[in-house]
Image (cartoon, helix red, strand yellow):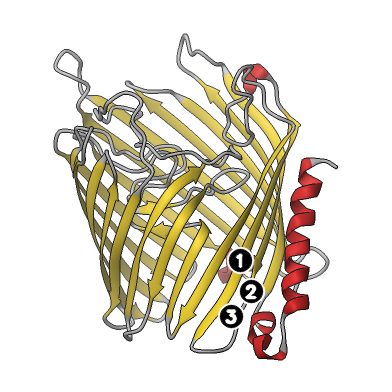
Amino acid sequence: MPRHTRLYSSLLLLTGTALGAASPAQAEFVKDSKASLELRNFYFNRDFRQDNAPQAKAEEWAQGFLLRYESGFTEGSVGVGVDALGLLGVKLDSSPDRSNTGLLKRDRETGRAQDEYGELGLTAKLRASKSVLKVGTLLPKLPVVQYNDSRLLPQTFQGGHLNSMELAGLTFDAGQLKEVNQRDSSDYEDMTIANGGARGITFRRGTTSDAFNFAGASYKWNDSLTTGYHYGELDEFYKQHYFSAVHLLPLGDKQSFKSDLRFARSTDEGTSNVDNKAFGAMFTYALGGHALGLGYQSMSGDTGFAYINGTDPFLVNYVQIGDFANKDEKSWQARYDYNFASLGIPGLTFMTRYLSGDNVDRGATLSDGKEWERNTDIAYVFQEGALKNFGIKWRNATVRSNFTNDIDENRLILSYVVPLW
């Protein structure tokens, strides 16, 4: 039996067993359960425009299947439940000279994209009052660690995560991650730090970590203001304190002004030289279907920003390709969004933005680094009829830099989510 058939057979068997075993006392376990299948078709093309590039372009096409199941909880003071995540990626087009897009798993020896790859993730969960503990496969989305879902299949982690909302307005999170499965892999491994670009981060060769500890809280003061503090520690690499504040100011009919402020302090922990202060601010004025945003981001200290390799850094200037988080980099962003629902076309959206960064420390003998990136997204989700929930998105990016790759990139993503129950 093919591996992907076994993968989904196991998940369906698990679901059927849970449903069949549920007694009247566990009615909420079944009643509150839900399942969906997402079909994700992804074409990725990245052209490297600089002279003497080691690879002319990366271009692949793949089909993804994401089967999600979430149970309810058994009745009682402590409820028990289970979640399951079945992932399958299938190659539609690739070749050795065009691989390494992040869509498909590659053979370690030949570099060729494999025909298929997948994962079955299980998560046990306990609920007491307004607190939930999850152990197993996790998709964390916190300021100090955010899983990456920008390709065919999402990045996943193994670990434990406690989320508590016992006090009104206060959300508390704590836990530990032990291993990571990257977005183009089916193998769990220890974690390491992102150190590409001109971050200036160094660490002892071969060092990895099997422990990322995190804790933090956010408090919603009212409908307009939310503040937060989170702590993350990647053992052997870095410690990080993250402060955030989001304020939404209504300005009248269909108008608002949003302020998003972020500050992180990162220091070394064990074998690295991490020393970074990251400040970011994004201000967005919205009027009807229009939204105009201006952002600024500043890096200071002996290195660039620190985060787990493969994850999405929680930075205002982290965009389609770049994060503008190199040593001493200063960057700004101008962004415009439009929702065509204002013109009577719900489901159609448009976004464009331009970012420019400079003052990157490339060493005493080199000039300061500079880079810019331009992004455009156009997306449409069918609102009714036979194609309801079918989405089409085109993403375009251009990057130019004097210290890293020059890139022209296009992504075409077709997605369809089918609720199973």
Q: Position of residue 295 (x, y in %)?
A: 29, 52
Label located before the other in sequence (2 or 1) = 2
Q: In this view, does 252 lie to the left or right of 17?
A: left
The quarter of the picture where residue 249 lies is bottom left
Is the residue under label 2 in contact with that under label 3 (CB below 8 Å)?
yes
> Type of residue at label 3?
Phe
Q: Is residue 176 left or right of residue 227?
A: right
Is the residue under label 1 in contact with that under label 3 (CB below 8 Å)?
no
**SS state under label 3:** loop
Q: Mark 1 points at which residue?
A: 83
Q: Residue furthest right?
A: 1
Give the alpha-carbon distance from disc 3 to disc 2, as whole Å: 7 Å
Whether residue 345 is visible, yes or no, is: no
- The residue carrying pointer 2 sits among few (fewer than 14), some (14 to 19) or many (20 or more) residues within 10 Å by Cα, namely many
From this view, report whether residue 85 is shown above or below residue 62: below
> Type of residue at label 2?
Ser
**Residue at left 57%, top 59%?**
349
Label located before the other in sequence (3 or 1) = 3
Q: Residue furthest top?
A: 52
Q: Mark 2 points at which residue?
A: 71
Is the residue under label 1 in contact with that under label 2 (CB below 8 Å)?
yes
- The residue carrying pointer 3 sits among few (fewer than 14), some (14 to 19) or many (20 or more) residues within 10 Å by Cα, namely many
Q: Position of residue 160 (x, y in %)?
A: 44, 60
Give the alpha-carbon distance from disc 3 to disc 1, as whole Å: 11 Å
